[in-house]
Amino acid sequence: MEDIVLDNNDDLTFLSGDFQLGESTLQEVGIILRLTQGNLKEFPTLGPNLFQLLNSNASQEEVTQRVMIHLAKDNKNYNEMKSLIEINMKKL
């Protein structure tokens, strides 16, 4: 999917005085995973609350299930995104 590209600080990027466009799927997934429910007025139930979940006694299965549910709310397939997420986490 192509959309406006954000930099590492989630700021807009510009190219020749206009918004830079590019592949945005992984960027969208990253934003969704950082959301807490209620952050988006238009979609108040979108947001897996991962920071809260990871600071609890949740199992890996519970975390995975919650990620799957919230990616599906944005029509993203967890199984397709899983390898991209893992690859980019290794780059950090």
Image (tube, rainbow, N blue to C red):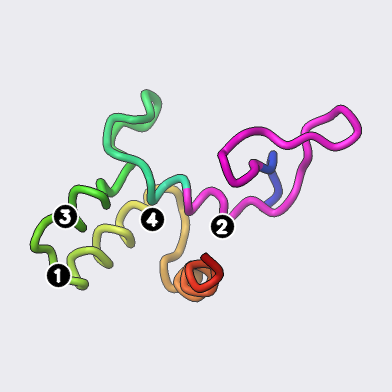
Residue matched to label 1: 59
Instruction: Residue 5 in the image: state x and y as whole percent.
Output: 68, 43
Tag 3 and tag 4, C-beta contact below 8 Å? no
Question: How many numbered circles does the render carry?
Answer: 4
Tag 2 and tag 3, C-beta contact below 8 Å? no
Q: What's the amino acid at mark 3?
A: Asn
For disc 1, the neighbor class at 10 Å (few under 14, some 14 to 19, many from 20) is: few
Q: Residue furthest left?
A: 57
Q: What's the amino acid at mark 2?
A: Leu
Q: CA distance from mark 4 to mark 2?
A: 14 Å
For disc 2, the neighbor class at 10 Å (few under 14, some 14 to 19, many from 20) is: some
Q: Considering only order in the chain, which callout, 1 or 2, is on the residue closer to the N terminus? A: 2
Residue matched to label 2: 26
Q: CA distance from mark 3 to mark 4?
A: 23 Å
For disc 4, the neighbor class at 10 Å (few under 14, some 14 to 19, many from 20) is: few
Q: What's the amino acid at mark 1?
A: Ser
Q: Under tag 4, what secondary structure?
A: helix
Q: Is residue 91 left or right of residue 57?
A: right
